[in-house]
Amino acid sequence: ALVIVYAAEIAGWLRTIVASWRAGERPSETLSFQNVNTFAGLVVATTPLAWLLVRSDWRWRGALVGLQLVCGGFLLWLFASRTAQLAAAAVGVAALAGQRRAGMRWLAAVALVACVAAAPSLNPRFRDGTMWTLHNRAQLWRGTVTLIAARPLFGYGWGDKTFQPVYAAHDPDRPEDWPHTHNLALQVAFGVGVVGLALYAATFCLVLGPLWRARRAADPDRARVARVLLLSAVAIAVFSLADVPRGPFHLYLWAWWGAALALVGVRSGPPAAPS
């Protein structure tokens, strides 16, 4: 399903890719998703799923995974989302650092340095003037924190239609018409207050600890699924520092939680003998 979506997106963009490249611009909207940054974040968060397919017995697994990586990588480059690209680098470094061999951890350190050095060349947006203000996000976050402090317990209500008018009234001279807070924790705290944020965080902490322990499970399939879900969590966490998973990405976030809950809720090992 992911490959079909990625390929359809590329096919739909074929007429505009060359024009955008020549004009030195990045596409502002996608065909199948609401926003290029959100779509790029979803591409990164779902990439670890390919690991499960590679280890399956399906005959076409190699071709499908290769197509997924090529299409996803092309879209990640095309949309030039810095947050998503940072999430991709974090996933790659975490995957190497999580290996048991010490040499792979040294390789992770080398990969981290290489990503930092290559980022400005791969994406010119890493070296433009907006990096100093995180594309005006610093101003947005300060204003959001002020609004949260005014109604800390239960917030203002969920959704873009709630955030936009409230923030516009608070900051009429804002540089952009922000649709959301560009930070998942701030978005949750704004919508449902610190009480809701604590419950939201507890929902995910409920499975992260068991997932971390399950990555070393004796059952190789169980350990592999746990590692894949942890890598997806890394992607979601890094992306959520400067953006918000919305639309299909938010659905994937809850699908991830459901899969993690199902994994940690399954007993590992032989069943107990009847008493």
Image: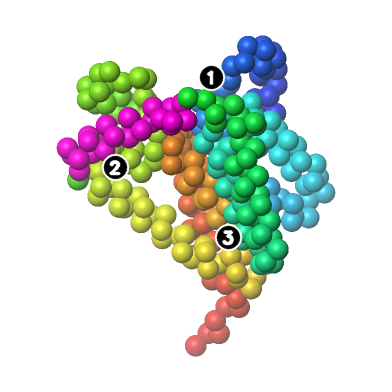
Q: Which secondary structure, mark 3? A: helix
Q: Which secondary structure, mark 2? A: helix
Q: Which residue is most to the right?
A: 59
Q: Which secondary structure, mark 1? A: loop
Foreground residue among 274 and 262: 262
Residue indicated by mark 1: 28
Q: Nearer the viewer, mark 3 or mark 1?
A: 1
What's under tag 3, amino acid-wise? Answer: Ala
Does the rendering let one see residue 250? Answer: no
Foreground residue among 243 and 221: 243
Mark 1: give few (<14), some (14-19) or many (20+) Cα within 10 Å. Answer: few
Precedes in sequence: disc 1 or disc 2: 1
The answer to whether residue 167 is above or below residue 148 is: above
Does the rendering let one see residue 104? Answer: yes
Mark 2: give few (<14), some (14-19) or many (20+) Cα within 10 Å. Answer: many
Callout 3 touching callout 1 (CB < 8 Å): no
Q: Which residue is most to the bottom?
A: 275
Residue indicated by mark 3: 226
What's under tag 1, amino acid-wise? Answer: Ser
Residue at left offset 66%, top offset 49%:
111
Quarter of the image where one finds residue 143: top left
The answer to whether residue 175 is above or below residue 104 is: above
Taking the image as shown, residue 113 lies to the left or right of residue 247, namely right
What secondary structure prevails in the magenta region? helix
Position in image of residue 157 (x %, y %): 26, 35
Residue indicated by mark 2: 189
Tell me the quadrant of the picture where the N terminus can be found. Answer: top right
Precedes in sequence: disc 3 or disc 1: 1
- Bounds of the magenta span? 130-152
